[in-house]
Image (cartoon, grey):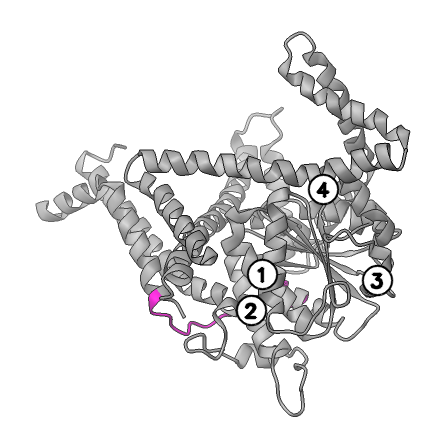
Amino acid sequence: MNKKTIKFFDKIQNIDRRYIYIVVALAIIFPLLIPFNSPTYVTKPTEDIYKKIDSFSGDKSKAVLLSFTHDASTMPELFPMEVSVLRHCFERDIKVFTICWIPAAAPLVDYAINTAKEDFDVQSGIDYCNFGYKPYALRLPIMLGMGDDIAKAVETDSQGRKIENLEIMQDIKNYDDMNLVVDFAASGSAIQWITYARAKFGANIAAGVTAVMVADNYPYLQTGQLMGMFRGLKGAAEYEKLVDVFASYKSEDHPHGRPFSKEIIDQTRVAITGDAVPYKYKKARIGMNAQSVAHIMMIFFILIGNIGYFITRKKVGGKHV
Amino acid sequence: MFETVSKIVAAFLTLSIFSFLYKDNPFYKFAEALLVGVSMGYAIPLVYENVFLPYVYTPIFLSHKFIIIIPAILGSLYMFRFSKNLGWLARYPIVFGMGIVGMGVPMSIHSSVLVQMRSAMLPIDGINTALIFIGTVTILLYFFFSKAHKGIYGKFTNVGVWFMMIGFGASFGYTVMARVSLLIGRIQFLLGDCLGLIK
């Protein structure tokens, strides 16, 4: 090994970390400013949630509950999932309920609903219903109570209206009807739904989690206790694509979207450059471009760092430095 | 107008937080303190309106359900945490809470233990089930500390260590992905929502 190479790696080993921050920032800024159409491969955990929700389309006796247990700090990962699921429900005429368990989640629920409903003719209390903020301390009685009677367990929605008087509640009584709960959280809160709503009442549970929490939730996905899972920004990007390709697809044969097909999703590449898809519905996919570049950069740094480590170790006689 | 001002404030606070990457400074400290204050300021009236009014005030004073006074007093005992002499009173609501947690134990055993165990006891009919079998057994052996990890036994426990390392690696990879996602979210806000450069 010549001296120049050793000197270079010595320098790299002791580089000021702030230079690395700049490189990371640039690796994210450029792909965002110059978007490109990278392929989004849809995985089974996301696909399963889509198929389950889609199976409720047009069925007034079925509904989906979206549970929000996070604050604004994890919005970049979870918010695109929430908007995509709401968009899917609005596109396919599926009744959807929302509930949140921490004060900071309350405005996020409103924000998600308002973002998704801009493009649809949907009404609160008829097509969707926000149960609003419910104290975390009441999570257990509400979870269990909804297994018997949702209107008694929740009582009022976010606007203070009696749940039982709302039109959306026709044919919706308990988990037999509100048959899918999707829990969006930056914690292991989906496990509570599994424990109380699934174990006792057989409700289908899916989780939308930040990437940090994916490994914790995987065992439940593997055993089928979670019927599907959105895994961080990637999961959000996958769902955005699914909704684009199927639920919001319009043609003479399919004026209200088309049914799911594995062949179609595998072969279709949705262009995210241009104005065909509104920005709010492709935010996760644009983000995944930057994510991919950042990952490649990190792998490069890890390789350089390790090569440098072994070279500098060799220099001092094979000892750890 | 309001939206523009709120975006400018949010962008300023985002940059103030990022300024910590260079070094600690008053802008970062200001933004950090503001976050804590605003979070509390937002939560207190919301909890008052959504918890105290519907679950305490209305049932007791308007519906005259006086039985609610008992849990209300029990909950109030939490405030004694701030007293040196009467701090022990705060243990009563905690004990009550623990009792409620206990109520969920049978269901937790079902979902977190029995169902999980059942799916770890599948017949070995492929590479995945074989890996699950080897991983589960060797990791369980690793955590059996009544026998020294030496000889053949030590070799088995080493396999368990490798399985755990792969698990931790996957977990760390996801953590990195999450942190990068958060940075992407903030930069999307600055470049997209504030400056309109992302379309």
Q: Mark 4 lies on which chain?
A: B
* Type of amino acid under label 3: Met
- Residue A309 screen position, x and y as percent: 26, 42
Asked if residue B94 is positioned above or below residue B165 in the image, the reply reads: above
Segment tinted magenta in the rendering: A33-48
Whether discs 3 and 2 lie on one chain: the answer is yes
Q: Which chain carries label 2?
A: A
Whether discs 2 and 4 lie on one chain: the answer is no
Query: Label 2, on which residue?
Result: A240
Mostly what secondary structure, the magenta segment? loop
User: Which label belongs to residue A81?
Assistant: 1
In the visual, does A275 lie left or right of B59?
left
Q: What element carries label 2?
A: helix
Query: Label 3, on which residue?
Result: A169
* Type of amino acid under label 2: Glu
The Cα–Cα distance between marks 3 and 2, rounded to whole angstroms, is 28 Å
Which of A129 and A76 lies nearest the eye of the viewer? Answer: A129
The Cα–Cα distance between marks 4 and 1, rounded to whole angstroms, is 27 Å
Q: Which of marks 3 and 2 is nearer the N terminus?
A: 3
